Image: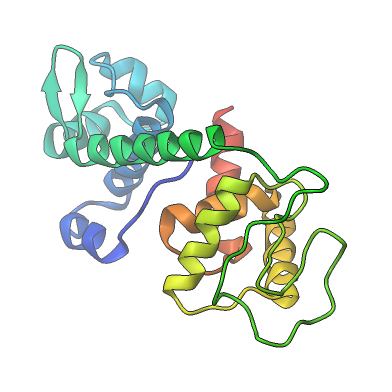
Amino acid sequence: MHYYNFNIGDYMKHTLHLTPEEDLAYRRLLDMYYDTEAPIPNNIPLVSRRLRMGLEVVESVLNEFFEFTEEGYKNYRADGEIADYHKFLEKQKANGRLGGRPKKGKKPIAIPNLTQSEPKKSLNNKQQTTNNIHTPDGVSESIFKDYLEVRKTKKAKWTDTALKGLQREANKANISLEKAMQICCERNWVGIKAEWVKDEVKQKQAWE
């Protein structure tokens, strides 16, 4: 799980008492939890070394925000986020089994009330801004349909300008257009800014 919801206000409310080092340890523990999708190992010296944090600091944060079990230190809120994420993936797989991108000669999927009434010049022969919207190159149909639903709920029309902007920010963040749309679906965003996810991408690359 490379991305997860982060409520800044809720986090600050529960961590204002932490020292800067404890705060950093907590964030790194959460990143480890979501990245591995498993409890934090009970071997605190090992965890401390992996996080590059002091042993006492790591132990203090684990005791406050995680529950010790035989399987490891658990964070039940994180477990809930991970479960929701896998439900989302299952939904994506189910949509994919219903059919991939339309083959040549077949009509594209009609998605009404998402675009302007007057057609604009399309970005390419596979991307149009009429009521018949084609899936952009490199993006799965299921991801694109979910993304358009998010835009629909936000009353945001899908245009060539929107596509170019999303592609530009995805390039800046060094992620694919499909990944940018997936992040938007997971976080209920209409669009994305590179600075919103660039640090997460760098951190993931560092762990790898």
The answer to whether 33 is drawn above or below residue 116 in the figure is above
Indicate left or right for 70 with 149 as reference. left
Indicate left or right for 46 with 184 as reference. left
Indicate left or right for 96 with 18 as reference. right
Residue at the image position 70 percent from the left and 55 percent from the top? 135
Residue at the image position 60 percent from the left and 37 percent from the top? 99
Residue at the image position 43 percent from the left and 23 percent from the top? 50
Residue 80 in the image: state x and y as whole percent: 23, 39
Dividing the picture into quarters, in which one does residue 88 lie? top left
Q: Nearer the viewer, residue 100 or 84?
A: 100
Indicate left or right for 182 with 55 as reference. right
Placement of the N terminus among the 4 image quadrants: top left
Placement of the C terminus among the 4 image quadrants: top right
The answer to whether 31 is drawn above or below residue 135 in the figure is above
Dividing the picture into quarters, in which one does residue 49 lie? top left
Residue at the image position 72 percent from the left and 74 percent from the top? 129
